[in-house]
């Protein structure tokens, strides 16, 4: 888990976000889907062949792949 710096949106709203990364396994028939109005796409990919991602998400995935049992918190 990583907390991102506070931001102020153009609307004046203040926000702060958390990055959470989970590894999971799914049945072959499972179809991921965006469950809310904020996401437009959801898909599975092989753990060793992720889609192109920015550095922030690449680092999150690397942490999750370390397969350590304890939670880790980063700022």
Image: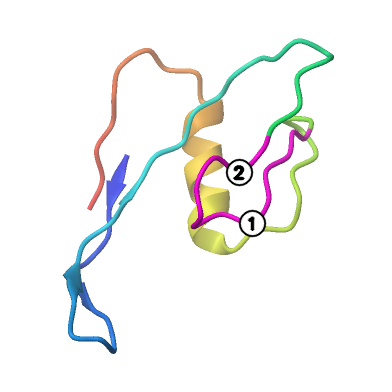
Query: Residue at left 76%, top 50%?
Result: 51
**Do tag 1 and tag 2 residues touch (Cβ < 8 Å)?**
yes
Residue 35 falls inside the magenta stretch? yes
Q: Residue 34 bears which disc, if any?
A: 2
Residue 15 falls inside the magenta stretch? no
> Residue 46: percent from the left, percent from the top?
79, 30
Magenta span main SS = loop
**Magenta span:** 33-45
Q: Which numbered disc flags the more N-terminal residue, 1 or 2? A: 2
Q: Residue 40 bears which disc, if any?
A: 1
Q: Is residue 18 above or below residue 35?
A: below
Report, in whole angstroms, how far the alpha carbon at label 1 lies from the one at label 2.
6 Å
Query: Residue at left 20%, top 66%?
Result: 15
> Residue 35: percent from the left, percent from the top?
54, 40
Q: Is residue 1 above or below residue 4?
A: above
Task: Count the labels in the image.
Answer: 2
Compared across the picture, whether 46 is left or right of 17 comes to right
Query: Residue at left 24%, top 38%?
Result: 73
SS of the residue at dot 2?
loop
């Amino acid at each position: 888990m990583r907390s991102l710096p506070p931001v102020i949106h153009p609307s004046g709203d203040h926000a702060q976000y958390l990055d959470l990364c989970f590894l999971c396994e799914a049945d072959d028939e499972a179809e991921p889907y965006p469950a809310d109005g904020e996401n437009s796409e959801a898909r599975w990919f092989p753990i060793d062949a992720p889609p192109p991602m920015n550095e922030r998400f690449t680092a999150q995935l690397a942490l999750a792949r370390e397969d350590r049992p304890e939670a880790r918190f980063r700022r």
